[in-house]
Image: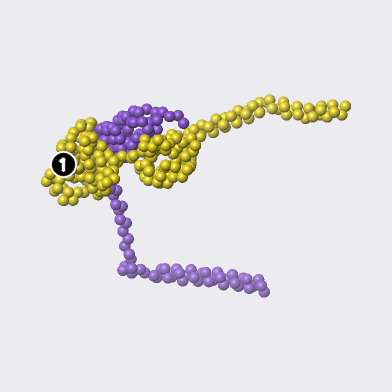
């Protein structure tokens, strides 16, 4: 008797699921979306970055410590751009090559130095990168 | 007799251990331990490097300083009994003198793992400003120039007797004078903020780039361009 009850319950559940699937199938196949209900989505293109001019400094790395006052500053920017490498006490001028690369030597002072590299492209656009570099012979 | 038997028995028990201490296995183990120690030391040396930073103090305690560096990065600095403090202005200078808003330079050992800097030298520091922009106008009477930046900030730049004016030439800077500073050109002003005037700068140097068009990102008003052309 109990077994029959269980079988009957299982059959009822399966039948219910089958009926639900059939109803859902007929609803989906007969349902039509009106054109007025369709909402158009448009993906806006991202706003171009304001500072679009490339200026990458490969050397020196920020916060680096040197035991030599004469350091090499190198990097990449717009081809033909004018480069100004400025510290608290000195400034060095350079021009980027046709591939945008540049490399020049700068003398730094004792202790910490702020090294600012400014690049000005041929159309006047400016970009800057700031580094902290230290000259120290202290051993610790 | 019993004592002799006991001693002999004890020696027999200890002897194999004493002998095994000299075996190649033990030597290899010692070599491996030594190798591990050397490797550990090499790893710790690679993990730590010297670094120097400049910035403004965000907070300070007797053992720690939080610094905002010139690029706006936050740096956690540890201070210990070996940290050396010095100041150009004060004869006695230590951690208790470090206050929020103060500008300092720190040289120390940076641990790449913990991302903390162990300070070895701390010094008070006055951070100069480097401002690129366009020279909009020039006031000969007051010896000032007006510099407008891409952030739409207008700076009044005081030109002192010691201020150097440098004109960019082909891969060099030529010294010039205040009277020769052109307007509506790109320039970089190096100096220090003037505490008496909002957006006021006392210039130590002005680097002028007169032979390039002005930065298109810097949009000047008609008033600015007309005031410049009337000078």
Question: Which residue lies most toward the right here?
Answer: B1
Q: Is residue B231 visible?
A: yes
What residue would you read off at disc 1? B140
The residue at 27%/32% (across/down) is A92
Residue nearest the viewer, comparing A107 with B143: B143
Give A84 or B139, whichever is nearer the viewer: B139
Q: Which chain did the renderer colour yellow?
A: B
Place residue A13 in its image quadrant.
Answer: bottom right
Q: Nearer the viewer, residue B155 or A41?
A: B155
At 36% across and 45% down in the image, what residue appears?
B72
Q: Quadrant of residue A44?
A: bottom left
Quadrant where the N terminus of chain B sits is top right
Q: Which image quarter holds the C terminus of chain B?
A: top left
Residue A6: % across, % down: 63, 71
Write the residue at 60% across / 28% down: B31
Q: Nearer the viewer, residue A62 or B82?
A: B82
Name the chain letter of the residue that bears numbered label 1: B
Q: Secondary structure at mark 1?
A: loop
Say few, some or many: other residues with alpha carbon within 10 Å of mark 1 (under 14 / 14 to 19 / 20 or more). Answer: few
Please name the residue shown 36% across and 37% down the image: B89
In screen coordinates, is A108 left or right of B159?
right
In the image, the chain rendered in purple is A
């Amino acid at each position: 008797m109990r077994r029959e009850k269980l079988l009957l319950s299982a059959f009822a559940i399966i039948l219910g699921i089958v009926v639900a699937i059939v109803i859902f199938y007929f609803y989906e196949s007969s349902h039509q979306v009106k054109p007025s209900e369709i909402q158009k989505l448009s993906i806006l293109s991202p706003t171009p970055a304001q500072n679009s001019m490339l200026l990458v400094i490969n050397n020196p790395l920020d916060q680096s410590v040197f035991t030599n006052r004469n350091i090499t500053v190198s990097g990449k920017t717009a081809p033909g751009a004018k480069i100004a490498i400025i510290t608290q006490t000195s400034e060095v001028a350079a021009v980027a090559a046709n591939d945008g690369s540049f490399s020049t030597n700068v003398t730094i002072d004792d202790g910490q130095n702020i090294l600012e590299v400014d690049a000005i492209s041929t159309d006047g656009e400016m970009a800057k990168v700031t580094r902290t570099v230290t000259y120290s012979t202290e051993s610790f | 007799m019993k004592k002799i038997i006991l001693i002999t028995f004890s020696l027999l028990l200890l002897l194999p251990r004493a002998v095994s201490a000299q075996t190649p296995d033990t030597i290899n183990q010692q070599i491996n331990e030594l190798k591990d120690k050397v490797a550990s030391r090499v790893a710790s040396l690679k993990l730590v490097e010297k670094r120097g930073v400049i910035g403004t103090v965000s907070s300070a305690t007797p053992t720690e300083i939080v610094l905002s560096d010139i690029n706006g990065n936050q740096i956690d600095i540890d201070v210990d009994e070996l940290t050396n403090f010095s100041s150009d202005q004060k004869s006695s200078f230590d951690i208790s003198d470090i206050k929020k808003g103060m500008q300092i330079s720190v040289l120390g050992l940076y641990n790449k793992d913990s991302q903390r800097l162990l300070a070895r030298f701390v010094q008070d520091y006055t951070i100069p400003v480097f401002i690129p922009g366009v020279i909009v106008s020039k006031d000969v009477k007051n010896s000032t120039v007006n510099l407008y930046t891409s952030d739409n900030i207008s700076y009044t730049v005081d030109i002192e007797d010691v201020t150097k004016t440098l004109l960019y030439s082909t891969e060099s800077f030529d010294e010039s004078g205040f009277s020769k500073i052109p307007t509506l050109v790109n320039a970089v002003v190096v100096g220090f903020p003037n505490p008496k005037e909002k957006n006021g700068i006392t210039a130590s140097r002005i680097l002028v780039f007169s032979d390039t068009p002005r930065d298109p990102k810097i949009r000047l008003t008609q008033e600015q361009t007309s005031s410049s052309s009337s000078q």
